[in-house]
Amino acid sequence: MKYTELIFSNNQQKIENEIIIAYLGELGFESFTEEDNFLFAYIPTEIFSEDTMLEFLGEKFSSVQITYKISEVEEQNWNAVWEQNFDHVIIPGRCRIRAPFHEPDPAYPLEIIIEPKMSFGTAHHETTFMMMDLILDLDLAGKVILDVGSGTGILAILAAKLGASRILAIDNDDWAYRNAIENKSLNDALQVEVLLGDANSIPDESFDVIFANINRNILLRDMQLYIRQLKPGGLLLLSGFYEDDQNVISVKTTELNLQRDRFLTKNRWMAEVFHLNSL
């Protein structure tokens, strides 16, 4: 079988490759690799339609110019090619995040196994890395946790490994929902319950800590729904936005009686820890 290779660049990374990957997957693309500032995507030639792709991506990214070039390649063992280019992630001295095809390494205090599927939601992104770094500094023993926009479930699984008694992981994407269930099983994270839904699906119960690694607009829209379920003195961890967005995030958190305890930045991305002041 012949495959068509497309090499994408997207106007100086104004959108994340992981978003492009998710949409290309809907068109039948089977494998993806990233190198420098380029995304390589592969689809069986017999089902590829350039016109369909352009129409689809034009609807999704109307304000961003995505450039690409096309060539044909012979069939390969795409899993082997992809695994060769997929590396583990290490939070130095604290945690290692690996795929099932990586060998365990007892040198790390914690290991999390994530089945990466289409190669996103695996701690390679700065926001997930910083959220995990912040979570590792928390005492979560016996705590009840909510993870909104949980993706692969990686933050919820980390909370389970740190001793949380119950973790509810919510995502509105069916792929993420199914992948989180798979990853929960891979890590024996029995405390994690995975729910398909959004902020309006949060049950009427109180949480000690809430994680929300999403994006600026959704955080601003839904933050008050999170706070409604957060215990006084409880912690809210936020990421998914740039340092340039911090001012507008700060206005919202102040309005909701949240006080910032700590923050991290990495490559212009930001993650913050807040606590809810008692009224």
Image (cartoon, rainbow, N blue to C red):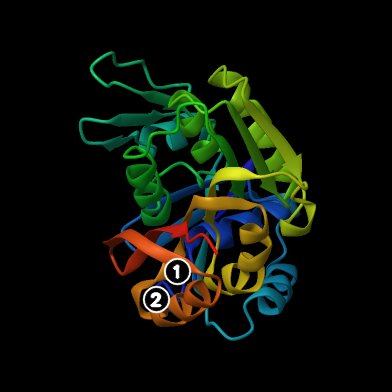
Looking at the rendered image, the quarter that the C terminus falls into is bottom right
Describe the element under mark 2 as helix, strand or loop.
helix
Q: Position of residue 220 (x, y in %)?
A: 59, 73
Identify the residue shown where x is 40% and y is 28%.
98
Identify the residue shown where x is 61% and y is 66%.
223
Q: Compared to 2, does 72 lie above or below?
A: below
Q: Is residue 28 left or right of residue 78?
A: right
Q: Is residue 173 left or right of residue 92?
A: right
Marks counted in the figure total 2
Describe the element under mark 1 as helix, strand or loop.
strand
| Label 2 or label 1, whichever comes before in sequence order | 1
- Residue lying furthest front in this view? 279
Crowd class of label 2 (few under 14; some 14 to 19; many from 20; radius 10 Å) = some
Q: Position of residue 77 (x, y in %)?
A: 52, 30
Q: Compared to 109, does 126 lie above or below?
A: below
Q: Is residue 180 left or right of residue 125?
A: right
The kind of residue tagged 1 is: Phe
Identify the residue shown where x is 66% and y is 38%.
168
Tell whether label 1 touches label 2 (CB within 8 Å). Answer: yes
Crowd class of label 1 (few under 14; some 14 to 19; many from 20; radius 10 Å) = many
Q: Compared to 121, does 6 lie above or below?
A: below
> Residue 107 or 66: which is nearer the viewer?
107
> Residue 55 or 267: which is nearer the viewer?
267
Q: Which residue is tagged 1?
A: 241
> Residue 42 or 99: which is nearer the viewer?
99
Q: Which residue is tagged 2?
A: 246
Distance in Å between CA atoms under marks 2 and 1: 8 Å
Q: Position of residue 242 (x, y in %)?
A: 39, 72
Marker disc for residue 279: none
Q: Position of residue 45 (x, y in %)?
A: 67, 52
Q: Is residue 151 visible?
A: no
